[in-house]
Image (cartoon, helix red, strand yellow):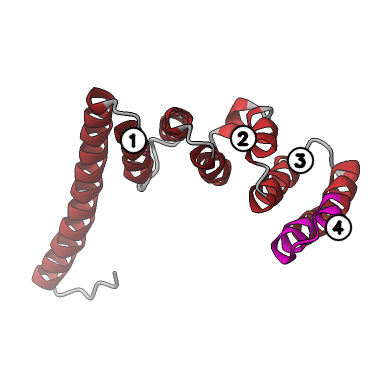
Amino acid sequence: SFAEAHASLAVLSAQAGPADEAEAHVARAIAIAPDAPSIRLAQARMYLMLGAHTDAVAILTALDPVSQASEPHTWEAARNWAALDRFDRVADAWTACLAAHAHRSDAWRFAIEAARARVRVGDLPAAAVLLDQAQVLVLVLVLVLLVVVLAQFLGQVGAQRLGVGVVV
């Protein structure tokens, strides 16, 4: 879309240096799609590149809770909060992402990121809980993979006994 094109140009312009050009592109993107979370994400990324971290987190924290808990938004928020030396907020962002996406096979990564941030602020008990959650999530993932491999193996053994070919 035109809005996403302008948002991308804003990020590219911020990388190249001229803040005025980047801000003009993001303004055009917002004019076209004012409520699109992807446009606001690009705006926050632009502010990150321009060193305007407070502006970036203001944009990201104004989004709806579902958008805030998405992985791309969490990465942007974490990078900006870290630049502001607010690792408590980094941990909060990753914890919200973990809660929203605990069903994902890679959710353990979110628990690890939250734990790392909790360690940075000295909250070792909370970090330990998050590391325990990461461990459980990894163990569940390994068990699921073992069940899949076992099912494939048993399917092949059963087919061989019956003299039937199996494609897995």
| Residue that label 1 marks | 120
Residue ID for mark 2: 67
Q: How many marks?
A: 4
Quick one: quadrant of the N terminus? bottom right
Q: Is residue 12 above or below residue 115?
A: below
Mark 1, Cα crowd under 10 Å, few <14 / some 14-19 / many 20+, is: some
- Say left or right for 126 vs 36: left
Is residue 41 placed above or below 128 in the rendered structure?
Answer: below
Q: Which of the labelled discs sits on residue 36, or is there none? A: 3
The amino acid beneath tag 1 is Arg
Q: Which residues are magenta?
A: 10-23
N-terminal-most mark, 2 or 3 = 3
Q: Helix or strand or loop: what does disc 4 sit on?
A: helix
Instruction: Kindly check if marks 4 and 1 are in contact, taking CB atoms under 8 A apart as contact.
Output: no
Mark closest to the chain's N terminus, 3 or 4:
4
Residue type at the position of mark 2: Ser
Q: Are marks 1 and 2 in contact (CB under 8 Å)?
A: no
The x, y position of residue 143, in whole percent, is 18, 47
Residue 81: x and y in percent read: 53, 36
Task: Mark 2: give few (<14), some (14-19) or many (20+) Cα within 10 Å.
Answer: some
Q: Which residue is mark 4?
A: 21
Q: CA distance from mark 4 to mark 1?
A: 36 Å
